[in-house]
Amino acid sequence: MIWESFSTDTPVLIQGMTGKEGQRMAKWLIASGVNVVAGVTPGKGGQEVEGRPVFNTVAEARTAFPDVTVTSIVIPPARVVGAVEEAVQVGIRYLHILTEQVPVHDVMRMKDIAHTHRATILGPSSVGYLQFPQFRIGYLGGESPFETVKEGGTAIVSTSGGMTNELMMALSRNGIGVRVAFALGGDRVVGTTLEEAISWCEEHPEVASLALFVEPGRPFLNALCDGSFVFKKPAVVFLAGEALDDLPRGLPYGHTGTMLGEGELTVRETRQKLRERGIMCVATMSEFIHVCKEL
């Protein structure tokens, strides 16, 4: 269970909507046509944000809007696991977590909770998800994504939020349309893995090809190199980060997931290994665009 085909009618909840980030997210989502129906902040029930009611609990919000199954969580790290548990217990099945610096043990617990309740988590540290027709969650695409992102058949899956946006805009500027885009989050452990997101995209009937941005050191790259994961649809992997080849091993650089361990292939070696297996793997944006046009 990953995502489903949402629409502009899909009701969305924001947990933490009265905070600074929650207010901005509500404003941006509503302006881009997303059906944000309510927010949740304990102790702030009865208030409004962007004309939408705020409730003290997710249960109260679900009572008022029983069709809500999607939520975005924009709260401090220490409270995220409790917010996830509260949401899934009352029927929320799709959870996006913008919050960064959530402890790994909390993420592991959230994954267990989600599995028990047959729910899907995107994040933490995820800037969001976007799909055509007009639906998104989080900040993916900026303030007005459906005015700037071209609709088409490419699925973008990325471990970097910034690069998800960069790839969407670069493809659109070059006349290549997007069907769905996942910013999975840069943490070492996240709710939705690369393999899960890719497999979902490959089953999507309107996705014709995949464009991936993967940070060095990800176990997924090893799975591609040894053939234990095989693409079913045309795909290109954008693997940058050659500077890591000359830096000490075993230390995180940039995103917490960007790390090369002792004995692992260098970035250059990984890229070459993927190419030997027939996988399109590029190092620059110009190469990426060129390959995407050929897929």
Image (tube, helix red, strand yellow):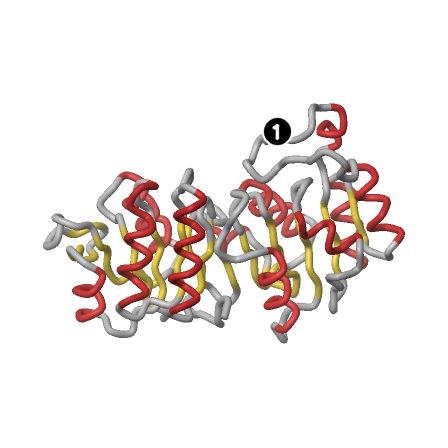
| Image quarter in which the C terminus is found | bottom right
Question: Residue 152 or 108: which is nearer the viewer?
Answer: 108
Question: Residue 253 or 103: which is nearer the viewer?
Answer: 103
Residue 33: image quadrant is bottom left
Element on which disc 1 rests: loop
Residue holding disc 1: 251
Residue 279: image quadrant is bottom right
For residue 141, side relative to residue 101 (left or right): right
Say which residue appears at 79% left-offset and 52% top-offset.
225
Image: 205 above or below 269? below
For residue 272, side relative to residue 218 (left or right): right
What x and y, as percent, mark residue 200? 59, 68
For residue 2, side relative to residue 172 (left or right): left
Say which residue appears at 54% left-offset and 44% top-offset.
188
* Residue furthest to the right: 276
Crowding near the residue tagged with mark 1, few <14, some 14–19, many ≥20 C-alpha atoms within 10 Å: few
What x and y, as percent, mark residue 94? 40, 64
Image: 288 above or below 277? above
* Residue furthest to the top: 247
How many circles with numbers are drawn on the protein? 1
What x and y, as percent, mark residue 137? 42, 56
* Residue furthest to the left: 46
For residue 287, side relative to residue 141 (left or right): right
Residue type at the position of mark 1: Leu
Say which residue appears at 42% left-offset and 40% top-offset.
100
Image: 47 above or below 210? above
